[in-house]
Image (tube, rainbow, N blue to C red):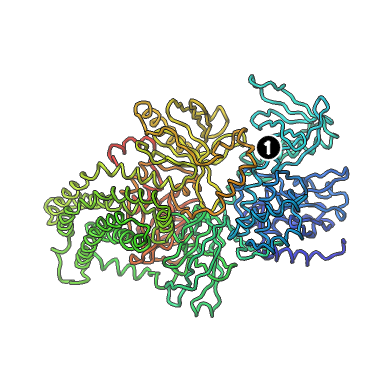
Amino acid sequence: MAELDPEPMASGAAQRLGAPETLGISTLDPGHKPPAMPPGRHVTIRVRMLDDTEELFDISQKASGKVLFDLVCSHMNLIEGDYFGLEFQNQQKMMVWLDHIKPIIKQLRRPKHTILRFVVKFFPPDHAQLLEELTRYLFALQIKQDVSCGRLTCNDTSAALMVSHIIQSEIGDFEESQCRSHLLNNNYIPDQMPLIDKIMEFHSKNIGQTPAESDHQLLEVARRLEMYGIRLHPAKDREGTRLSLAVSHTGVLVFQGHTKINAFNWSKVRKLSFKRKRFLIKLRPDLNSSYQDTLEFLMGSRDCCKVFWKICVEYHAFFRLFEEPKPKPKPVIFTRGSSFRFSGRTQKQVIDYVRESEFKKIPFERKHSRVQHNIRLSPLPSPRPHEVPTESGAPGEIVDSPSRRCWKESVLVSAEDPSASRTTRASPSQQRNGHGDRTGSVSRTEETRGSTRQTHPEHLSTAVVSNSPHLSASSGHSHGMVNGQKSLELCGHSPNGRQPSPLTSPLLNDAGSVRTDDEDEVRRKRFPTDRAYFIAKELLTTERTYLKDLEVVTVSFQSAVGQDEATPESLKNTVLSTFEPLHKFHTGFLREVEQRLALWEGRSNAHIKGDYQRIGDVMLKNLQGLKPLTANLHKQTEVMLELEKACRASRRLEGLCRDFELQKVCYVPLNVFILRPLHRLSHYKQILERLCKHYPATHVDFRDCRAALADVSEVAEQLQGSLSKMENFQKLLELKKDLIGVDNLVVPGREFIRLGCLSKLSGKGLQQRMFFLFNDVIVYTSRGMTATNQFKMHGQLPLHGMTIRESEDEWGVPHAFTLVGQQQSVVVAASSLTEREKWMEDIQVAIETAKTSNGPSSELLTSNLTDNKCPEDSSAEAESEDDITASHTSLERPSPHRGNTMVHVCWHRNTSVSMVDFSIAVENQLSGNLLRKFKNSNGWQKLWVVFTNFSLFFYKSHQDDYPLASLPLLGYSVTIPSESENIHKDYVFKLHFKSHVYYFRSESEYTFERWMEVIRSATVPSSGARVLNNKESHPH
């Protein structure tokens, strides 16, 4: 066997799990190759993979275990390799883990005759923490092995349910004769025959489920089982009772047979040690506990004790520590105790590393699966048929191509500079024919468009923003990422294509969209330089965007929803009577502004000057004409209430509205468009205030501007009373769509205050949770791995009687504070000191307010989920297996949900925003042309850019109906480039987040100042002190 050439087997595996020329990296930094092989005699190591294949690796005997492990991970293109390990049978016939630090020659006495098994070593509590599809596939193979050998014991229902997902992944949709034949020929569980009918029944409910989704569902069922990830180590207690010890992410467990009879949480354990055959657990003093300070278990031998002690040390370090423990200094004279330590990244480091890095995704083959239509790596499956546009021969033109069913993943996608973009180019013939076939296998990235199912931009750098974006045709549902933006990738016919970063798409890189520096200088000299002109131009650019937003309601919404028989006549009439007159009025207003700017620039009548270099008269005339439409502005409230009422009454209408929000034209939530006319008044007011401040009192335009300002202020004051209530109502409705498990979120008297990411301290360590602060209750949730992309409620803390205190020193966790309720206390940690101060101040104000106000009529939120208890509680840890079927049903065919809301951005950027931030963001909306440059690119690209909802949305021109990409700005910093960056241009600002850098050029000093101002309002959310001030100056 040793004489076999390893090359053919390595090649075959590379073909199965990834291309051999692109090494996937596990515990190495991006772009680094595995460590150099140390000199010395080489030996061939045989490794058995989870799919039962065997691979040969040629390695130096002096190499450490880590070198071999990295070679295996690289061979599979596995990024999250830290969850896995190599185990083998030592000379004592015990299964032990390959030590990463020791040389292989000291661990494998007969390497040629030893088979190492590549298996899962660390089982996380929630498979949502596994970010790569390949990782989840390997975990599914491990579960399949554990079920087959009887290690993962469960009841018949759970066993049948898991097998149904396994065969769905392997043979696809249910077909009775094929399914029965497959089960008769393949044995997945011990004593399978009596369960065949039940397995087939469950399999029939999985129609349409992709292999990636089947992996997700399999892991969802398995993680609820008591024996999930458990490896039993025989032992006895002091009385000689036969027991078994095991370790998990929560701590050390004690089993009798396959029943857990005790658990010692890591937070209760002071020290683990062993002395000869005795394994010792020293507990922290607890007055309420009947246990002794030290528990003693007798194991088979000293080696058994040491093996179990080592895996306990590694489990504790991997799940509880923030970073790899540093090695102890070697003693000079003698040693005491073992020098063993955990070597590798902790779970937190793995998650942060994958989120912050970008990797080229390598297709892989599922060995036992006949279903290969979604063979690619991406974070989460979210099937949906949609139309597929392709690139036409004309630059930047999008044409429809025949529809094709593509399985997309939802990710927050990040647009990096062109050098980092990952693209598979179409062949020249394909380009000539306008059919560049591509599809996305997106990693975590940043800017995106197309609505998503899950979620990474980011990475997100967020994008996210969360999962893979994609472009769909003009009316199709696109599921890309943050803020509902469509990715610039074109989903083509090739399932193995590569998706480029959204802002480096040919749609934005064609020659027609690039303006040279010489052309720019000529154009700038030709246009007026007066500050008043650029203020008037801001009115023009924002009015163009506003009119497009009105058309979303009057045209797109009416055609998609208004014509359906499920839409009540009263709703149709209310929408039409409210928005049609406004659309007609602003169409005329925009035409007059465009004509005036053309005269001002001298493009229409170059000899006419003076009287036409002003805008106040146009605004005064039209704002006076807007007064009769004040009644229409008051009806925005009626439209929103009528729409919500109709959606509650008709499930079909609710589905139509949800599908409409998934379309690329609806780039922000629908209710935001409904409130746009109210927000537009504040924009007019700001523009007129700037003009009045700029003009001297003697200027010909000053009087008209002041009169127009008085008119718009009068109308705005009339509407101010209802605006704050409607914004709060709109935000509650938006949050209702993001949450599952909450029935009565929108009730009279409830006010939204802040949402954001905090880490909750529990027996499992720090768990990322999304917190929502209202004026009566705090709700904490986690994001599920379902295609709905929503957040599930884990618990709630009423504000009545609550106290709050800092607890960083108490728990040793940075930026920690404790919420002490009447029935429950929760310790949470913010991502920074600033975040902690915001949360603590807002919560303290809300607690004080709750003491004096009645609050909402329904004090506590009710849940429609049976398992909404905090999973960190030990009582909730072991879920009933009988509930698994019900859980499966709820996940079976989830409704689509936009994963582009601010909640998802905060989740990926680990930050928070308040209601005051949302109100300020409403006032700071801007649009216009900008030149954009990447960090490593040379040319500048001209784009139409819209800033709203804390994000930049990118278009080719202002005439486009929908954006091509988006960039959520939470977490970004905006600065001026330094000299060392060699950006020798005027009016340039820089956006920076981690490794993502973008440069933008504006055309004047005024527009530069305005873009800096509005972007800072999104990148630097208000502090707690500012909240109170703004509630006075911004009552809405």
The N terminus lies in quadrant: bottom right
Q: Nearer the viewer, residue 796 or 709?
A: 796
The mark tally for this picture is: 1
Q: Position of residue 1010 (x, y in %)?
A: 31, 53
Residue 844 or residue 998, whichever sits in front: 844
Picture quadrant of residue 227: top right
In the image, taking residue 987 as reference, residue 933 lies left or right, namely right
The amino acid sitting under disc 1 is His
Q: Position of residue 264 (x, y in %)?
A: 68, 31
Relative to 723, 488 lies left or right: right
Quadrant containing the C terminus in the rendered view: top left
Q: Position of residue 688 (x, y in %)?
A: 21, 52
When asked about the image quadrant of residue 328, the answer is: top right
Residue 455 is at least partly visible in this image: no
In front: 940, or 897? 897
Is residue 766 at all visible to an observer of this figure?
yes
- In the image, residue 660 sits, relative to residue 809, either above or below, namely below
**Residue 629 vs residue 434: left or right?**
left
Q: Residue furthest top?
A: 287
- Identified at 68% across, 52% down, the residue is 198
Q: Which sits in the foreground, 515 or 8?
A: 8
Taking 727 as reference, is 836 above or below it? Answer: above
Q: Is residue 725 above or below residue 365?
A: above
Q: Secondary structure at mark 1?
A: helix
Residue wearing tag 1: 316
| Residue at 51% in and 57% down | 413
Near mark 1 (Cα within 10 A), the count class, few <14, some 14-19 or many ≥20, is many
Residue 680, image x, y percentages: 27, 52
Name the residue rendered at 39%, 38% in the picture.
Answer: 753
